Image (cartoon, grey):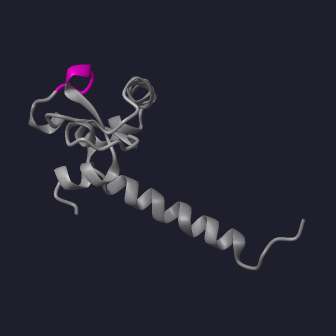
Amino acid sequence: MPRKPGEQYRKRKRRKTNEIYNRSRPERDKQYYSRQWKRVSRLYRQQHPLCEECEREGRITPAELVDHIVAVSDGGSMWEWENLQSLCWACHNRKHGKG
C-alpha cells in the first residue's frame, strides 16, 4: 500500500518529541501509567460510573476519570479506595484550578 509523502518522518518526529516530553515529566507521574493504576482506575469507575461531585450537586454526569481526594503528593494514599473519587473532566479541572 503506498504511503503518504513524509509519513515516516512525521512518525519518527512525533516519537522523538514524546520521548523528550516523557523524560521531563516528574517521577511521581509514572505511577499513573502503571498496569496496577489502570486496573484500579477501571474497577473504581465500573463501581462508580457517575461523577461523584455532580451527584452531590444533583446532576447526572458520566465519570471520565478517577481522582484522589487528598493528593498523593500531600500524603494521600495512592491505592486506598476511600481516597478515590470518580469525576467528569469539568469537575476535575475545577478542583485543580484548570478551568
From this viewpoint, which residue is outermost toward the left?
74
| Residue 99: image location, x then y, percent | 22, 63
The residue nearer to you, when weighing 65 against 18, is 65
| Residue 91: image location, x then y, percent | 25, 49
Among the 4 quarters of the image, the one containing residue 44: top left
| Residue 27: image location, x then y, percent | 27, 43
Whether residue 80 is visible, yes or no, is no
At 47% from the left and 65% from the top, the residue drawn is: 17
The residue nearer to you, when weighing 55 against 19, is 55
At 25% from the left and 40% from the top, the residue drawn is: 28
Query: For the image shown, how many numbered marks are present on the structure?
Result: 0
Residue 78 located within the stretch drawn in magenta: yes
From this viewpoint, which residue is outermost toward the front?
58
| Residue 35: image location, x then y, percent | 46, 29
The residue nearer to you, when weighing 77 against 22, is 77
Segment tinted magenta in the rendering: 77-82
Magenta segment, principal secondary structure? loop
